Image: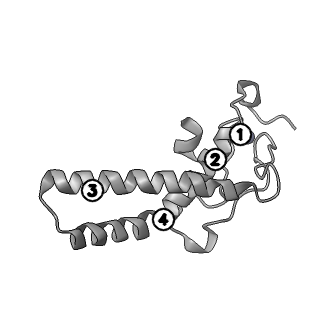
Amino acid sequence: MRSIMHMSCPRCQEGDVFKEANPYKFGSLFEMHENCPHCELRFEVEPSFFYGAMYVSYGYSVALFVATYLIMNWIYEPTILQIVGALAVMVILLAPLILRLSRITWLNIFVKYNPSKRGPKLK
Ligand SMILES: [Zn+2]
């Protein structure tokens, strides 16, 4: 969870995964470090590794849709057009964040935390 929340390396939880911390700087949205700046973990474990993050992205999007729908229904009874409009706005606004969250979650599924990789960089 800590690695996902801080978008840091899943193994050492110290190095940044993305070159730019702000996901809304569109020029560098997809730019990731090839290796962890702290523990040298190679982030792209195998070629096309991050294609699998699409499944995670789908899960996050469905959760977002359900939450938006439930909250809207809880507050008032929206029309179907209002629901679709709200979902479209949510998807457009949160797309960069969901993209990064899904990549870091996908990476965390395959790379385990290793406390011995924390601390000062050894080099
Ligand atoms: Zn690391």
Q: Crowding at label 1, few (<14), some or many (≥20) Cα neighbours within 10 Å?
A: few
Q: In this view, does 95 lie above or below 56?
A: below
The mark that comes first in sequence, 4 or 3, is 3
Q: Distance between the residues labelled 4 and 1?
A: 23 Å
Instruction: Give the Cα separation between the discs numbered 4 and 3.
Output: 18 Å
Which of the two discs, 4 and 1, labels the residue nearer the N terminus? Answer: 4
| Number of residues whose C-alpha sits closer than 10 Å to that of mark 3, classed few (under 14), some (14–19) or many (20 or more) | some
Residue 69 image label: 3
Q: Do the residues labelled 4 and 1 touch (CB within 8 Å)?
A: no
Kind of residue indicated by mark 4: Ala
Q: In this view, does 11 lie above or below 103?
A: above
Q: Where is residue 75 in the image (x, y as percent from the top left)?
A: 14, 54
Q: Label 4: state its secondary structure.
A: helix
Q: Residue at x 67, y 51 (%)?
A: 17
Q: Mark 4 points at which residue?
A: 95
State yes or no: discs 1 and 2 in contact (Cβ < 8 Å).
yes
- Which amino acid type corresponds to the residue marked 2 in the rendered image? Trp
* 32 vs 70, nearest the viewer: 70
Which quadrant: the N terminus? top right
Name the residue type under label 1: Phe
- List the residue tagged with mark 2: 106
Q: Mark 4 and mark 3 in contact? Answer it, CB < 8 Å.
A: no
